[in-house]
Image (cartoon, rainbow, N blue to C red):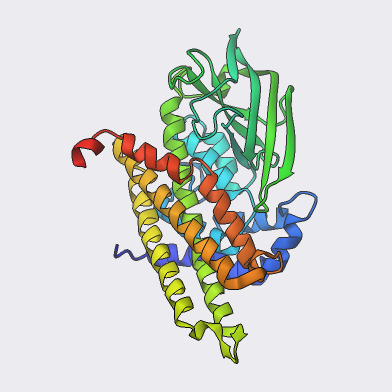
Amino acid sequence: MDFQFTQEQQQFSDALRRWMEKDYTFEHRKKIVHSADGVSSDAWTTLAELGMTALPVPEEQGGFSGSAIDMLVVMKEIGRGLVVEPYLATAFGAQFLKLAGKQESLLEQVATGELKLAAALGEKQSRFDLFDIKATATANGDGYVINGTKVVVVHGGQAGQLIVSARSSGQQRETGGISLFVVPADTAGISRKDYRTIDGQRAADIRFENVQVPASALLGEAGAGWDILDAAADYAVTLLCAEAIGAMEALNAATLDYLKTRQQFGVPIGKFQALQHKMAEMFMQYQQASSMATLAAVKVASADPVERRRTVSAAKARVGQAAKFVGQQAVQLHGGMGVTDELPAAHHFKRLTMIEQTLGDTDYHLARFIAQPGFSQAA
């Protein structure tokens, strides 16, 4: 795929990279990860000042109306720099607000960086099936009462508002009967257990116990939230693919540098033909995944949901395959150093592993791709 970024997109990329090279170095990141909060308020403020929080927000709410391609540019740099701030979670949550409409005030707060969001969707039994929901939303007067537990909510402990999926009607695994709500994280009845994940990010298990919300908290129509949820999840998958591309690019570069400096038998090991072949294949895997991630960013806004699902799942599957190959080969080529906390390579590998498992792994998205209408006829 022959694709060139615009001057504005390249400026966003360059600004982010300069900041990371100066103020968000690997050593600085390690201190943030091991801090009590696990995130940095200063880093978040800088992201807002650089316009990153405003990028996905519509112009009418003080944003830049950035497309998925614009976000791809940003997410690649975030993947390269191993950023642990709640940017992806907030962009994911903002997509729900945009698709549902009538959430101008919250979107304005997102644009300025004042508000962080998190999507509380997964449950213990649901795995990757986001329609498998036990949490309930019961109509009560002029509002709803939410009960249930959401698990591994990425940056759920840092969010000011939560996007919550709950069942207002229907059976546990039906796509019908799902309602979506935007709920302040400090609402009475909400308890959050925040923890660090293996890749240095933050997540939380969130319990909703008789949480009362007004009717205005409903996103879209009651019982008809699946289409919004499905589209927003595909958007987040596209951002994850872009982040993985940035991480793979950085991992390839780090591995190449290591092969040039590590010596065996008096010569750099990069001179060994077998290792050169591995690096060449790592590069090809990265390039193929990059093309698919770009295609997903182009198609995720498609008016045809079948085309959107097909392309996004194809991209997530291909990126997942490449991430596994590049990560494992990088660790092998680094030797024992490849799994130590002292080198960025181990952290990129962990992040790639988590991305592959987030919002559907490779096998899940291959099955989803095959299940789309028209696949059997095309085959």
On screen, 73 above or below 197?
A: below
Q: Tell whether 159 sits left or right of 134.
A: right
- Count of all numbered marks drawn on residues in the image: 0
Q: Nearer the viewer, residue 118 or 257?
A: 257
Residue at 38% over, 50% down:
315
Residue 364 x, y percent position in the rendering: 44, 39
Vertical position of residue 222 compared to residue 243: above or below: above
Rendered residue at 48%/44% (across/down): 361
The residue drawn where x is 54% and y is 45% is 357
**Residue pushed farthest bottom?**
266
Q: Nearer the viewer, residue 256 or 111?
A: 256
Residue at the extreme front: 265
* Residue 127: image location, x then y, percent: 54, 33
Vertical comparison of 93 with 316: above or below: above
From this viewpoint, which residue is outermost toward the right?
36
Residue 301 seen in the figure: yes
The residue that appears at 37% across and 64% down in the rendered structure is: 6
- Identify the image quadrant of the N terminus: bottom left
Hey, which quadrant is residue 285 in on the image?
A: bottom left
Q: Farthest residue in the left direction?
A: 377
Residue 312 lies, in percent from the top left, at: 38, 45
In the rendered view of the protein, which quadrant contains the C terminus? top left
Which of the 4 quarters of the picture holds residue 375?
top left
Specify whether residue 303 is in view.
no
Along the line of sight, which residue is nearer the eye, 59 or 126? Answer: 126
84 left or right of 111 in image: right
- The quadrant holding residue 311 is top left
Residue 245: image location, x then y, percent: 47, 60
As drawn, 148 above or below 62: above
